[in-house]
Amino acid sequence: MSRADDAEDAEVDKILDSVDGAEAKLDDSMRVELNTLILETVSDDFLRTDRPSGHLTSDPILLKYQRSVIFHMLKTAGKTLFQGKSLVNISLPVRIFEARSYLQRITDAWGNQAELFKAAEAQDPVERLKHTATFNISGLRYCVLQAKPFNPILGETLQATYPGGINVQ
């Protein structure tokens, strides 16, 4: 293991506590840093056209965070089952939520607008279906690396500008 790997491991351990038992606690600054990292990963991924579709999360901070959430949920579910309670009543810990709402998060999946333009321009119905399906499937890969969003806020609206001059208000 190189010194760079050791330094990276130390940084990961600084941001998230050890996941050996299952708990990883985040203070507010760490939560903001994690959410910023998630947003940067998603926006950088939109710009990459040098590889086939799909997403491989290799960031050690995100991987450790995702593992800690899974371990926590398994631990909670196990305790609930041993107590003879229903799994329906398990509450989610706040640390697994992303600091964005569902409406903000869904815009990541709609980022591949070029496929919809191709579908609109296609004359063949089969080609239109292919481009529409590509648009829908291409957005799924961004859901893999994100935490659970908060529920939509009452009255929340979306205003966005997409490539190609599309304004949504």
Image (spheres, rainbow, N blue to C red):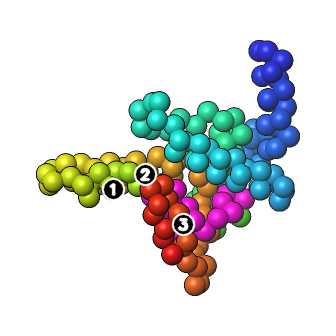
Q: Which residue is mark 1?
A: 116
Please name the amino acid that badge 2 sits on. Answer: Asn
Question: Is residue 48 in view from this perspective?
Answer: yes
The amino acid sitting under disc 1 is Leu
List the residue tagged with mark 3.
160
Q: Do tag 2 and tag 1 residues touch (Cβ < 8 Å)?
A: yes
Per the rendered image, the range of residues in magenta is: 95-110
Q: Does residue 64 belong to the magenta stretch? A: no
Pick the front one: 112 or 121: 121
Q: Secondary structure at mark 3?
A: strand
| Sequence-earlier tag: 1 or 3 | 1
Q: Considering depth in this image, is 88 or 145 the residue closer to the camera?
A: 145
- At 41% across and 55% down in the image, what residue appears? 113
Residue under the image location 59 percent in, 84 percent down = 154
Q: Main secondary structure of the magenta part?
A: helix
- Which of the 4 image quarters holds residue 117? bottom left
Q: CA distance from mark 3 to mark 2?
A: 14 Å
For label 1, the crowd category at 10 Å Cα-Cα, with few meaning under 14, some 14 to 19 and many 20 or more, is some
- The residue that label 2 is drawn on is 112
